[in-house]
Image (cartoon, rainbow, N blue to C red):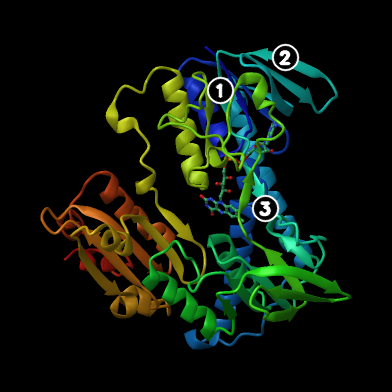
Amino acid sequence: MRFVIIGGGPAGVQAATQAVKLGAHVTLIEKDVLGGAANLWDCVPSKAMIATGAVLTENRRSRGMGLLSDGLRPDLDEIRERIESITIRLAHSTSELLASQGVTVIRGVGRFLDEHTVVAECDDGTTVEIEADCVLLSTGSRPRIPDWADVDGDRILITRQAYPPKEIPEHLIVIGSGVTGVEFVHMFRCFGSKVSLVVSRQQVLPQKDPEVAAVLESDFLDSGVRLYKGAKAVSIERSGNEVTVTCDDGRIIRGSHVLLAIGSIPNSEGLNLQAAGVRTDKSGYIPVNHHCVSNVEHIYAAGDLSGKLPLASVASTQGRKVAEHAMGLDSLEHRHLDYDKAASAIFTEPEIADVGLAEADAFALGRKIRVTKVPFATNPRALISGDPRGFVKIVSDPATGVVLGGSIVGHNASELISVIALAVTAHLKVDDIYESLLVHPALAEALAEAAD
Ligand SMILES: Cc1cc2nc3c(=O)[nH]c(=O)nc-3n(C[C@H](O)[C@H](O)[C@H](O)COP(=O)(O)OP(=O)(O)OC[C@H]3O[C@@H](n4cnc5c(N)ncnc54)[C@H](O)[C@@H]3O)c2cc1C
């Protein structure tokens, strides 16, 4: 089996390693950095910036912990170097892994010549033609820039230009209140910027449980973040060191910098998809079935390009499933990827994480559920560590006790949600969580309490 992969992000890399294990001859074409945008622009640098911001926040909290603080200031060059070194280290270990497994990696830009031939325009100026029995397209996505925004990389920024920007913004206006937008609000308030957030609906995180979003909103407001709700930005003007954002309801916000976080667009246009007969939807995503197969039987799309859940974790699982399907291992029902069971997290402080059925969605569906909620305010570990914000919420089936979903707001929610994610995937019951002998003192004890 000659398996060709275009795009070496989480989807492409995972597909490559799995396919080669199953006996395929794998060629992976990557034009930039192995590990993909996830490593270079998205997950890794954003969480590295947030980690630095968290140290600053912790330092500010030190008086409450009985310590005297002499203050810390960000060193932007060192932050930039730190992020680069993490990215390089991850790309290097991915490269070594692929080499050790026998994956052929071509540095260059891939596209179709016809449905069984892929061409790579290599970094060294040469062109390679590769015959393929199967092709995976995993070229990811990039930030959407609306035509009314003149991004200059200086004061009008997309996320990729903010790791870190040339200076810490005095007043940052973030446009877009989805996961990326709120993470950047959090990141820059930690660095001491005044932050305003343009929220096109009436709730930040419009896709999330309103109770969860409310905790974040009130935390933002408490820390001085200004929310412009029900407002869509329609223009950005820059005059010297000032930027002005005008909203469709006439409101005007003045600041020092603007950051756009209004979604992504797929990297599908350079792939010469017509030559292979692969169809896209009107936004450029490649529609796929539950095996990530496109409209052409031997051509798959995975990761952000497939238009499913834009998460690195989902991309890599899709990549693994693609390899298994291509190599004929898909016969078992349980091997299908269930996007409704994907855990996700928002790396604000407090962190927010959820998985499975949300309470609000269950009500909208008219489905009977049992909801139990336990605040961290009474959890010994939360009190000891000085951050008792947030709660654990478990959604279960009242008839069987099977765990259907859950949300966690609080310190380390992104780690704690794994317990509920496992329960949802393995159809465990609330009793299974309740009967587990957990560590004391631990935040996870709130999970057992919520399961009680
Ligand atoms: C700011 C931000 C933060 C995020 N944080 C998280 C997070 O914390 N957790 C999480 O799970 N998800 C996060 N995401 C989402 C995550 O980054 C994406 O879902 C993930 O990167 C998608 O992986 P992928 O394999 O589809 O593609 P990508 O990671 O985008 O990789 C695609 C690769 O294809 C290459 N490529 C493109 N075209 C070609 C071509 N023609 N030839 C050769 N190579 C090509 C690119 O260079 C790139 O390396 C974040 C997103 C953003 C914007």
Q: Is residue 434 left or right of residue 48?
A: left
Which residue is identified by label 1?
101
Percent position of residue 387, x then y: 42, 78
Q: Residues within 10 Å of mark 2 (few under 14, many from 20)?
A: some
Please give the residue where the numbered disc 3 appears in the rendered image. 144
For image coordinates 68% across by 14% down, the residue present is: 130
- The alpha-carbon separation of the residues under discs 2 and 3 comes to 32 Å
Up/down of 93 relative to 78, above or below = above
Which residue position is annotated with label 2? 129
- Front in this rendered view, residue 63 or 289: 289
Q: Residue furthest left?
A: 399
Look at 29% across and 66% down and name the residue there.
393
Split into quadrants, the picture shows ligand 1 in the one at top right
Q: Measure the alpha-carbon separation of dots 1 and 3.
A: 36 Å
Q: Is residue 222 left or right of residue 404?
A: right
Which amino acid does the dot numbered 3 rest on? Arg
Which one is nearer the viewer's eye here, 365 or 304?
365
N-terminal-most mark, 1 or 2: 1
Q: Which mark is residue 338?
A: none
Residue 343: % across, % down: 40, 52
Q: Which of the two discs, 1 and 2, sits closer to the camera?
A: 2
In the picture, measured across the screen, residue 439 lies left or right of residue 212, that is left
Do the residues bearing badges 1 and 3 touch, measured as CB atoms within 8 Å?
no
